[in-house]
């Protein structure tokens, strides 16, 4: 019994500092976790109570990284408590660097979580404060650029902690970047194309665009760093390389001021005497139409002598830019103009072929019947 007690006493005497250190580290982890949960919980509830939903969402996503950082500190102190009495010089030498790298990775993770929740919660926050939706393309661009900056900065800091020469790395990166640039010119062009789209904003997500040179049109669904995804009107997806936007014409019909009506009315040549009155009546009707934007100009003129009819040109703009509504306005206008033609006693022309005979055609003389030979008496 005395030997057991002596052995126990010697064990505690030799490892008391280690046990105390490990226990302290565990207490730090438990207490730190509890304090972090309580503090962030109070901040989240306070933010929700005062209408700060955006801030509450960010704070809620920071809880897990903070807890992991607390336990990383606890693990560091526990490792120190174990390695110091045992004189583990190698472990003691790398522990600070490991802790710094792990903390930097945790910070990067927390920053990326904040960026992700901001992209989803910021539009609702702006809508609740200003009553308007922010540009989704701008939000997406800021999110992508922020992620790149976070990864680049944290990566450089980790390399510095690991005693890498940043100057040599940058010099090597410059030479390697030139080589990669020559080898991947298409990828680089696509990246610059995406940057141009984000800066100039010729279109945004949700708008439909037309690429006349490529005969591609559809609604923009996603703008990536390499390709932009369009959804055609037949629901087919189109993946357009971003470098095309640097050298091709892009049409954005939803941004037009008005929709154009450019058509003709055909009247029979037989109604030539009524042409002037019909043209004037149609012009007055278009000039006073409530759905036609007069500020952009409206023209109704006898245009040309067609192959089979007299052509009256109708050129004007609707007040709406919605395609469906514009087609409905054009339909009503054409029906009303057709009625005006009828009211003047004229008819709309259809392609016909007419043959005029200027003089009677000579009729051929009937041929004489063949004579029968006379009968000879026997």
Image (cartoon, rainbow, N blue to C red):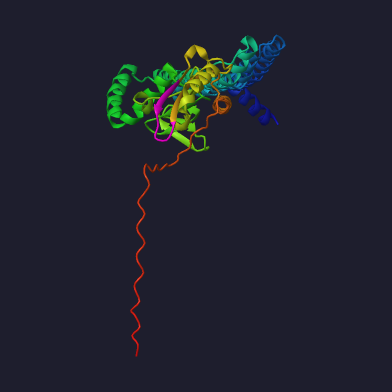
> Residue 56: where, in percent of width, then height?
65, 15
Residues in magenta, as a range: 301-309
Who is closer to the viewer here, 242 or 292? 292
- Say above or below: 11 vs 160: below
The residue lying at 65 percent from left, 13 percent from top is: 128
Is residue 75 in view from this perspective? yes
Q: Which quadrant: the C terminus?
A: bottom left
Q: Tally the numbered discs.
A: 0
Q: Residue at x 46, y 32 (%)?
A: 270
Q: Compared with residue 306, is residue 93 higher up or lower down, i.e. above or below? A: above
Quadrant of residue 6 in the image? Answer: top right
Instruction: Specify whether 365 is left or right of 6.
Output: left
Image quarter of the N terminus: top right
Residue at the right extreme? 49
User: Residue 342, relative to residue 201: is it above or below?
Assistant: below
Q: Quadrant of residue 61?
A: top right
- Residue 42 image-quadrant placement: top right
Task: State the residue in front, 102 or 198.
Answer: 198
- Can residue 84 be seen by looking at this rendering? no
Q: Which sits in the foreground, 297 or 30?
A: 297
Instruction: From the top left corner, tell me how far across and down residue 374 is, in percent.
Output: 34, 80
Reply yes or no: does residue 47 show up in magenta: no
Q: Residue at 37% of width from left, 41% of height from top?
A: 358
Q: Residue at x 45, y 41 (%)?
A: 352
Q: Residue furthest front?
A: 377
Residue 351 x, y percent position in the rendering? 45, 39
**Residue 175: % across, % down:** 27, 24
Determine whether, in the image, residue 263 is placed left or right of residue 117: left
Query: In front here: 221 or 101?
Result: 221
């Amino acid at each position: 019994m005395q030997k057991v007690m002596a052995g126990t006493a010697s064990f505690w005497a030799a490892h008391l500092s280690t046990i105390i250190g490990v226990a302290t580290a565990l207490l730090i982890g438990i207490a730190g976790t509890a304090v972090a949960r309580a503090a962030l919980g109070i901040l989240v509830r306070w933010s929700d109570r005062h209408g700060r939903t955006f801030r509450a969402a960010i704070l809620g996503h920071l809880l897990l990284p903070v807890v992991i950082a607390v336990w990383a500190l606890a693990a560091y102190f526990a490792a120190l408590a174990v390695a110091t009495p045992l004189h583990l010089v190698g472990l003691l030498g790398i522990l600070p660097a490991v802790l710094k790298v792990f903390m930097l990775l945790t910070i990067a993770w927390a920053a990326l979580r904040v960026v992700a929740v901001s992209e989803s919660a910021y539009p609702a926050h702006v809508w609740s404060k200003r009553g308007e939706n922010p540009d989704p393309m701008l939000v997406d661009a800021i999110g992508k650029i922020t992620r790149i900056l976070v990864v680049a900065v944290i990566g450089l800091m980790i390399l510095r902690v690991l005693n890498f020469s940043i100057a040599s790395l940058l010099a090597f990166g410059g030479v390697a970047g030139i080589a990669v640039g020559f080898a991947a010119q298409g990828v680089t062009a696509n990246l610059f194309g995406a940057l141009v789209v984000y800066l100039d904003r010729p279109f945004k997500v949700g708008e439909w665009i037309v690429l006349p040179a490529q005969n591609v049109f559809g609604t923009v669904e996603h703008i990536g760093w390499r390709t932009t995804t369009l959804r055609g009107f037949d629901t087919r997806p189109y993946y357009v390389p971003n470098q095309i936007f640097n050298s091709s014409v892009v049409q954005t019909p939803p941004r037009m001021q008005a929709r154009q009506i450019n058509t003709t009315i055909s009247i029979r040549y037989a109604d030539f005497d009524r042409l002037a009155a019909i043209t004037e009546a149609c012009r007055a009707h278009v000039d006073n139409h409530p759905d036609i934007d007069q500020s952009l100009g409206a023209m109704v003129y006898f245009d040309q002598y067609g192959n089979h009819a007299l052509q009256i040109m109708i050129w004007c703009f609707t007040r709406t830019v919605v395609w469906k509504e514009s087609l409905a306005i054009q339909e009503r206008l054409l029906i009303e103009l057709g009625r005006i033609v009828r009211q003047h006693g004229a008819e709309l022309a259809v392609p016909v072929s007419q043959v005029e005979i200027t003089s009677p055609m000579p009729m051929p003389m009937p041929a004489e019947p063949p004579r029968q030979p006379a009968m000879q008496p026997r």
